[in-house]
């Protein structure tokens, strides 16, 4: 359990680049390096994580549940989100005190090519094992095109799963492997009682962001217009320029862009408001993943489920690859960036360097302004 939490703290601290980048880090650590989660099971978790809420947080919940049950799931989510949440609090405090954003653009410029290489490495690792026939290759290509076109990822995965009913099966339920695969069925999570002194403002913050979490589909950038409409236009909790600055701050952290809600919550009610907003936004998706994880083994044995997952697996590989294209389109401004991508990919996929060391190389390149 301690090792699990330490791993998610590390991933949450270095996962610059959004959800797909952190998924790549999870695949590197849990699948390739320590073999705690079978590849097919990990891919299923990625697919299920897209259904509702922040999918990187959902995948952390799925992995934690598969390894240590309900307790592992909840603690994994907390450990994963904690580094970015704390950094968001720190930057929000500076912003509302001095009305400025710390200048970290140089380091971020150096990290971007490494993040793209990390995503490409994950797509390569998953794709070479799930693309076993021409129909699966076609599904992956279709998902790649859909991802580049920025179609809703959840809809793409559902469509790919439906196509899976037309494929011949070549998959079996993943073997129970790894040191802590037994699920503690007797684990009971007791609901935390709300203190009677909870102020109306905190309750309002929680219910507002919980309602947004119920319609949080398709990733953090899909969440942006929803938050803008609710927080700026309808409620007036943030001014337009504050909302944009909050997005910038959330992009400076290694966590999901959805942590802009912590910025908003901090503005409204300090640390308590930030915590209430963050928990409320992610709660619906986490609860859904917990429910699915509880029934995962039973559903996996069904033939219909296996057909659905046979179509979903290559689609996940295609969507991950599409993320690399989208990131490169927005992050690369010169050929130097492509050189850094190729070099980083060689270190990751060829020489098997740990991602943390490769990210450090990118940060140093950006800090010393070696990328024009």
Image: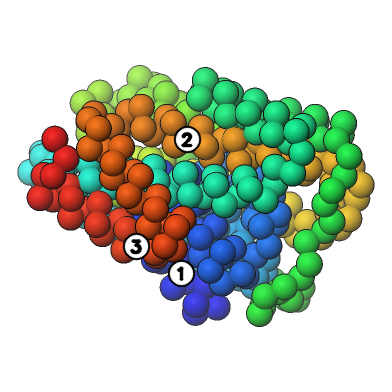
Q: Secondary structure at mark 1?
A: helix
Which mark sits nearer the N-terminus, 3 or 1? 1
- Say above or below: 134 vs 357: above
Q: Residue at x 65, y 65 (%)?
A: 37
Gap in angstroms between the C-alphas marked 2 and 1: 24 Å
Quarter that holds the N terminus: bottom right
For the point 58% across and 58% down, the residue is: 61
The image quadrant that residue 154 belongs to is: top right
- Horizontally, residue 180 falls left or right of residue 7, namely right
Which one is nearer the viewer's eye here, 29 or 83?
A: 29
Looking at the image, tell me whether mark 2 or mark 1 is earlier in sequence order. Answer: 1
Task: Write the residue at 51% across / 60% down.
Answer: 28
Please say whether residue 259 is visible from this viewpoint: no
Q: Position of residue 46 (x, y in %)?
A: 61, 48
Q: Which residue is mark 1?
A: 7
Q: Which residue is mark 2?
A: 323
Which residue ends up furthest to the left in the rendered image? 98
Across the whole image, how many numbered discs are drawn on residues? 3
Q: Secondary structure at mark 2?
A: helix
The answer, for residue 3, to whether it is visible in the render is: yes
Pointer 2 and pointer 3: residues touching (CB < 8 Å)? no
Q: How is the image coloured?
A: rainbow
According to the image, label 3 marks what residue? Answer: 356
Q: Pinpoint residue 259: horizontal percent, then vertical percent.
A: 37, 44
């Amino acid at each position: 359990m301690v090792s699990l939490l330490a791993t998610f703290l590390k991933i949450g601290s270095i996962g610059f680049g959004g959800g797909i980048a952190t998924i790549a880090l999870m695949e590197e650590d849990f699948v390739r390096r320590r073999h705690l989660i079978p590849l097919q099971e990990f891919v299923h978790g990625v697919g299920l994580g897209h259904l509702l809420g922040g999918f990187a947080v959902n995948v952390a919940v799925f992995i934690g549940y598969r390894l240590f049950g309900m307790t592992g799931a909840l603690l994994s989510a907390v450990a994963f989100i904690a580094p970015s949440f704390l950094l968001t609090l720190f930057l929000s405090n500076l912003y509302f005190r001095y009305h400025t954003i710390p200048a970290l653009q140089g380091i971020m410029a150096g990290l971007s090519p490494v993040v793209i290489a990390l995503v490409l490495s994950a797509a390569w690792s998953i794709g070479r094992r799930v693309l076993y026939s021409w129909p699966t290759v076609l599904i992956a290509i279709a998902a790649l095109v859909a991802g580049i076109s920025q179609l809703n990822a959840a809809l793409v995965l559902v469509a790919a799963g439906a196509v899976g009913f037309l494929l011949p099966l070549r998959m079996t339920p993943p073997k129970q492997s790894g040191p802590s695969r037994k699920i503690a069925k007797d684990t009971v999570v007791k609901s935390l009682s709300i203190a009677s002194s909870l102020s109306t403002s905190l309750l309002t913050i929680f219910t507002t962001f919980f309602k947004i979490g119920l319609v949080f589909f398709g990733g953090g950038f899909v969440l942006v217009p929803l938050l803008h409409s609710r927080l700026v236009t309808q409620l007036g909790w943030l001014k337009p320029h504050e909302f944009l600055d909050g997005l910038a701050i959330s992009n400076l952290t290694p966590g999901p862009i959805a942590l802009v809600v912590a910025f908003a919550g901090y503005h409204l009610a300090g640390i308590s408001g930030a915590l209430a907003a963050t928990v409320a936004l992610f709660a619906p998706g986490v609860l859904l993943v917990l429910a699915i994880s509880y029934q995962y083994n039973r559903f996996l044995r069904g033939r219909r489920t296996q057909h659905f997952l046979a179509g979903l697996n290559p689609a996940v590989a295609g969507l991950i690859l599409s993320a690399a294209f989208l990131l490169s389109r927005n992050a690369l401004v010169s050929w130097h960036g492509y050189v850094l991508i190729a070099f980083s990919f060689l270190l990751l996929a060829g020489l098997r360097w740990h991602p943390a060391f490769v990210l450090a190389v990118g940060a140093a390149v950006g800090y010393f302004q070696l990328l024009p």
